[in-house]
Image: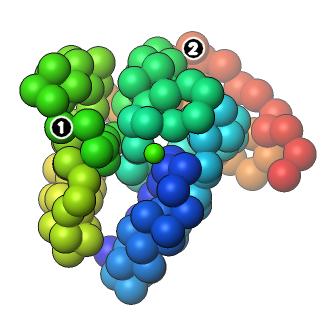
């Protein structure tokens, strides 16, 4: 599957394990170790999907999701060691598309990512796509009708 996935996860080994499985499927992966770093990255680039950890240093995954949802409908799978019902309800309530609790078999996560990508692709064939489109050095904010120059790579 051709897709670009952003992984926000502070445990290096976990992030690399997920990345390895996705790369085997032909998915391009970017890893961020904090939500702050993730926010900077999504400012510049739209991903097909975000894999998001909840327990992060600094801004946590829930806060990241709330900030992201103000400007983007990118599909998000929350991957968390916190398996309380409250966390799952909160996560889905503020805009997560899926919630996977750790530990999980990587194959299961990959299958869910695959399913979610398929769903979001068929959804966005309509006019409902929000967020940014990129044209060379510019990005076009479809909602705000705002054309911006993308800052230096
Ligand atoms: Ca963590």
Residue 140: x, y in percent?
A: 63, 31
- List the residue tagged with mark 1: 83
Secondary structure at numbered mark 1: loop
Badge 2 element = loop
Q: Position of residue 3 (x, y in %)?
A: 42, 65
- x, y percent for residue 149: 82, 34
Q: Residue at x 39, y 85 (%)?
A: 24
Instruction: Tell me the residue that label 2 is attached to.
Output: 144
Q: Residues within 10 Å of mark 1 (few under 14, many from 20)?
A: few
Q: Position of residue 25 (x, y in %)?
A: 34, 81
> Quick check: can you spot residue 130?
no
**Quarter of the image where the N terminus is located:** bottom left
Residue that appears at 84% across and 52% down: 153
The quarter holding residue 88 reads top left
Q: Earlier in the sequence, mark 1 or mark 2?
A: 1
- Of residues 146 and 150, the one drawn nearer to the viewer in this rendering: 150
Q: Residue at x 39, y 50 (%)?
A: 51
Q: Residue furthest right?
A: 152
């Amino acid at each position: 599957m051709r897709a670009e996935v952003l992984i926000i996860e502070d445990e290096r080994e976990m992030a690399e394990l997920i990345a390895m499985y996705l790369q085997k499927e032909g998915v391009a992966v970017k890893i961020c170790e904090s939500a702050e770093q993730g926010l900077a990255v999504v400012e510049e680039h739209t991903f097909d999907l975000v894999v998001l950890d909840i327990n992060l240093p600094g801004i946590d995954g829930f806060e990241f999701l709330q900030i992201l949802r103000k400007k983007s409908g990118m599909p998000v799978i929350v991957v968390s060691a916190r398996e309380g019902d409250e966390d799952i309800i909160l996560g889905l309530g503020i805009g997560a598309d899926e919630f996977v609790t750790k530990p999980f078999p990587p194959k299961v996560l990959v299958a869910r990512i695959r399913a979610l990508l398929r769903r979001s692709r068929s959804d966005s064939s309509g006019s409902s796509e929000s967020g940014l489109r990129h044209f060379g050095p510019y990005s076009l904010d479809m909602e705000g009708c705002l054309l911006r120059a993308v800052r230096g790579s």
